[in-house]
Image (cartoon, rainbow, N blue to C red):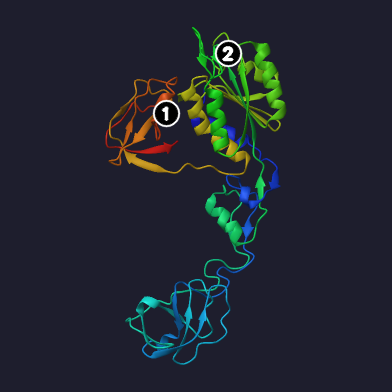
Amino acid sequence: MITFEKAFETALNSARQLDTERVDFRGALGRVLAEEIRSDMDIPPFNKSAMDGYACRRVDLGNELTVIETIAAGNVPQKAVDLNQCSKIMTGAMVPESADCVIMKEYVEEKAKDIIQFTGDRTADNICRKAEDIMTDDIVLNKGVLIAPQHIAVLASVGNTQPLVAKRPEVAVIATGSELLEPQSKPGVSQIRDTNSYQLSAQIEHMGAVATNYGIAGDTVGEIDSVFKEAIRQSDVVIVSGGVSVGDYDYVPGIFKQNNINLLFEKIAIKPGKPTVFGTSENKYCFGLPGNPVSTFVLFELLVRPFLYKLMGHDYEPLPIQMPLEETLASRKAKRKRWLPVAITEKGTVKPIEYHGSAHINSLSAADGLVSMDIGVAEIKKGTSVKIRLI
């Protein structure tokens, strides 16, 4: 059994980046950039007005000014501003030659037709200077960026409509267990509905990878092996839930080995999720996750999600959040790193929620995140600032 930190390092160090492809930038949301993006122009490309007002020379602010033209956004000024002159200008329009400030229209008095007077004491320049945001050939997005809506705008601003991105991992999901039924079926005595396949598929799709649900394999070597062979042939990553512990019907680790998967670890000192298996074969990767749904969910978030992002060339770092505990956390056993579901309160604290163990999937529906208790730590006192891993 290895620590979670060692398991994390082992898995991510084995990840080899997938091939790349060019995509239309409008469909690039959630993809990972496989190249640096540079600007093809200065931004702003000219000195532009930051507001509606009048462009003039600062030295003339105390004088009456003659309006010589009106400049709308998208138009080129036809006249340079000279002594005691100004141009009426709209937000985003090009500032005319010689003008070094734009006075807000709210601080202007109209003395006569095309004659104005500044009524303020002083003014900022109110000019967005050419190239003050970006210069031609500047890097605007780095390789490895996970593309978010704001990055779509950046791509558009520099005219990059076909960014190079990593291909999305093809991930196969298999649930094992002769007791499992599809959700539309009514369980009989000793049966339960399959939740892991649908939960894992949703987690995979939510992070931008491609999920294929291979359904339920009963607890026989032949059935699991048959489904696994098909899944590994068509996918980059296979995730099998259930059948990974030490019971009489826990065949998954052996089936991995029979199919030339080199197992890099078979147990992690973590709760929930101890019997987690990971192995590789060339450019194929396999995870065996515990059958209890909270274990499956947590191990995906902690280990599989960062691994899949690594395949795409992205170093995943969850948003760091710290809050004080509203209640003391206590654990009877401290031999494994423990993760507990918590909720964020209106008071700006975090409190544990009712949690009956790794089969209690409903507990996660009320959780905002997870809080960990390290190996050897049996108690975290009320009021202690703790890190929250949002889910």
Relative to 357, residue 37 above or below: below
Three-letter amino acid code at disc 1?
Leu
173 lies left or right of 54? right
Residue 171 point in image, percent of width and height = 63, 31
- Residue in view at x 55 percent, y 38 percent: 207
Q: Mark 2, residues whose alpha carbon is within 10 Å: few (<14), some, or many (≥20)?
A: some
Residue receiving disc 1: 364
Residue closest to the far front: 113
Mark 2 highlights which residue? 250
The first of marks 1 and 2 along the sequence is 2
Per the image, label 2 sits on a secondary structure element best described as loop
Q: Is residue 379 above or below residue 164?
A: above
Residue 174: x percent and y percent?
Answer: 61, 22
Q: Nearer the viewer, mark 1 or mark 2?
A: 1
Residue at the image point whose x is 56% and y is 24% from the top: 197
Left or right: 194 in relation to 137: left
Q: Is residue 4 left or right of residue 116?
A: right
Amino acid of disc 2:
Asp
The part of the image, by quadrant, that contains residue 286 is top right
Q: CA distance from mark 1 to mark 2?
A: 26 Å
The image quadrant of residue 246 is top right
